[in-house]
Image: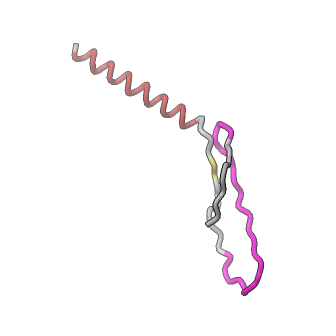
Amino acid sequence: MLLFKRMKLVFCAAGLALLWVASALSAPRLTMPETAFDFGYVPQNATVSHVFWLYSTGDDTLKILSIKTG
């Protein structure tokens, strides 16, 4: 009887782990290869810009609902 309870616990834990992995694989994911950029010396009143590339690398649709600059 004790062996049956242990086997049941192991199967439940394995099932939960499988569900967790499956949900993590299908989640949308944002990848930013470059998260910071150093402009170096910039003269006063100069205008500078830089492009950051964002990639959707997850298996589901990625929705960007809000962007906050820092």
Q: Residue furthest left?
A: 2
Give coordinates of residue 65: x percent, y percent: 67, 49
State the residue in front, 41 or 66: 66
Q: Main secondary structure of the magenta part?
A: loop
* Residue 36 colored in magenta in the image: no
Left-right relation of 26 to 54: left
Quadrant where the image shows the C terminus: bottom right
Q: Quadrant of the N terminus?
A: top left
Tell whether 20 sits left or right of 70.
left
**Of 30 and 63, the residue lying toward us:** 63
At 28% from the left edge and 15% from the top edge, which residue is drawn? 4
Rendered position, 36 above or below 44 = above
Which residue is outermost to the right? 47
Identify which residue is drawn at 38% across, 21% down.
11
In the image, which residues are magenta? 39-61
Where is residue 28 shown, x and y percent of the image? 62, 41
In the image, residue 55 lies in the stretch drawn in magenta: yes
